[in-house]
Amino acid sequence: MTVTFIKDDFLLKNKWSKMLYHDYAEQMPIFDFHCHLDPKEIAQDKTFLNLTDIWLKGDHYKWRAMRAFGIEEKYITGEASDYEKFLAWSKTLPYTIGNPLYHWSHLELKRYFGIDELLTPQNADRIWELCNEQLQQESFSAQGLIKKFNVKVICTTDDPTDNLEWHEKLDEKSFKVVPTFRPDKLLAIGEESFPNYLLSLEQETNRDIQSFDEFIQAIRDRMDYFHKRGCRGADHGFSTFPYAHANEEKAEEIFYKAKQGVSPTYEEQGIYQSYLLTVLGEFYHDLGWVMQMHIGALRNNNTKKLKQIGRDIGCDSIRDFDLAESLNSFFDELDQRNKLPKTIIYNLNPSHNDIVATTIGNFQAPGIKGKMQFGSGWWFNDQKDGMEKQLLTLANQGLLSTFVGMLTDSRSFLSYPRHEYFRRILCNLFGTWINEGELPEDPTHIGSIIQDICYHNAANYFPIEERIAKG
């Protein structure tokens, strides 16, 4: 028997919520301003071997759930066949109730494959065959899936040494794929790989980097290279944010130390990173880029699995640390120089929500709606409770109406229903406020705000089409 629970009014609890979603939010296009999709797979219009290939590979959310259910690692990241891994997931999913995976997974089955039933071991074989049959259709290629969900812009995440060849091969008229500058390795001066990374930077810039100034110039060369190819943003990943005022002389001294293969102390790493981050922030401002900051992940905590499987396989956690003073100091440093770029902060620790929301309010600017942004619930917070907390905190401390909204932050082509999930949660929040008399019964005005948050605010914040045309 088919059991349906993702119905037309899923998560919409009153007439106003339903009206806002169906009349205003549902048909809005998607502006995915941060994701980890592979531009090569988009350019080559990748097709997928089977349901495991597109649905389970690389999905550390599902891997964590399977481990919690006691599934052996060989059926998660190991040598088991794709079919066996899918069967293991079919055993796990019915017991993820209360986890966002329960909603996401069934929403993905319904929106992509038209399967309106709960996945169980009993129907796993049939669903496997139905999905695999559809994956052979042209509409299920990488580009076909992007078009299916009316995605207008995709901003990938790219290392500064990437030659961006796959972005240049994309000439898709219905959507744009542009790079995003991710300079984490430039800042990771404490890593053993840093000297070798400098060699890669030399190769891509045709520079012999002997001085700190040449290093900075090489970085700017790469930023200009990215800019000419449509990049209009940078993204950073920070475990903590230990910003401290630093000068060029000290940063240069630490740079030379690392270049010679001598690992800087933790304090020295913070000084170097603080100085370089300020330099990067000024460059972003001058180029008109958006600076995105993902703060608070404690990564690769299971040493055994790190050695056996590798990095980024689902053994990460939320980190606790002091944030307020360093974050405000960094923004203030750039603001005093009139070099503070548009900025989005994604916060992983929900106890920092009010810190982030009040910090961005300190550095807003005339003429730019929502110059400083508190980004959508990220990673462990991109579920119903986390999204609602982020929305309520932003509403309480700032202007929710100027919010740039949702993003996928995903490596999967099956992640676009996350925008639907977010939009339903957003509309239910506003609809509940109307229903309880906390907002006027003015669906036209409220609906326009909903549409702004779903798409228009991001499109105006990242004017990709206009800036690409201007070069």
Image (spheres, rainbow, N blue to C red):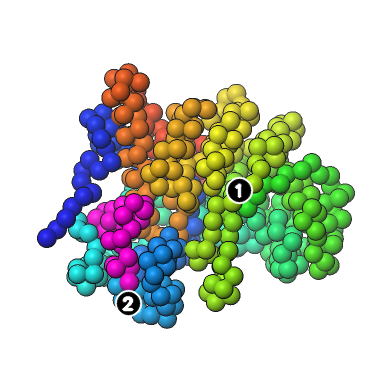
Q: Are marks 2 and 1 in contact (CB under 8 Å)?
A: no
Q: Which quadrant of the figure has residue 347?
A: top right
User: Does the magenta portion include 105?
Assistant: yes
Q: Which quadrant of the figure has residue 212?
A: bottom right
Q: Nearer the viewer, mark 2 or mark 1?
A: 1
Residue 320's label in the rendered image is 1
Which residue is nearer to you in this view: 128 or 404?
128
75 w.r.t. 101: above or below: below
Query: Residue at (29%, 72%) from the top-left corner?
Result: 87
Residue range in magenta is 88-113
Query: Residue at (74%, 47%) from the top-left corner?
Result: 274
Residue 170 seen = no
Q: Rate crowding at label 2 as few (under 14), some (14 to 19) or many (20 or more) other CA atoms within 10 Å.
A: some
Residue 84's label in the rendered image is 2
Whole-percent x and y of residue 46? 39, 67
Whole-percent x and y of residue 113? 24, 60
27 w.r.t. 111: above or below: above
Gap in angstroms between the C-alphas marked 2 and 1: 38 Å
Which residue is nearer to you in this view: 266 or 205?
266
Determine the main secondary structure of the stretch shown in magenta.
helix
Where is the C terminus found, in terms of image quarters?
top right
Residue 218 seen = yes
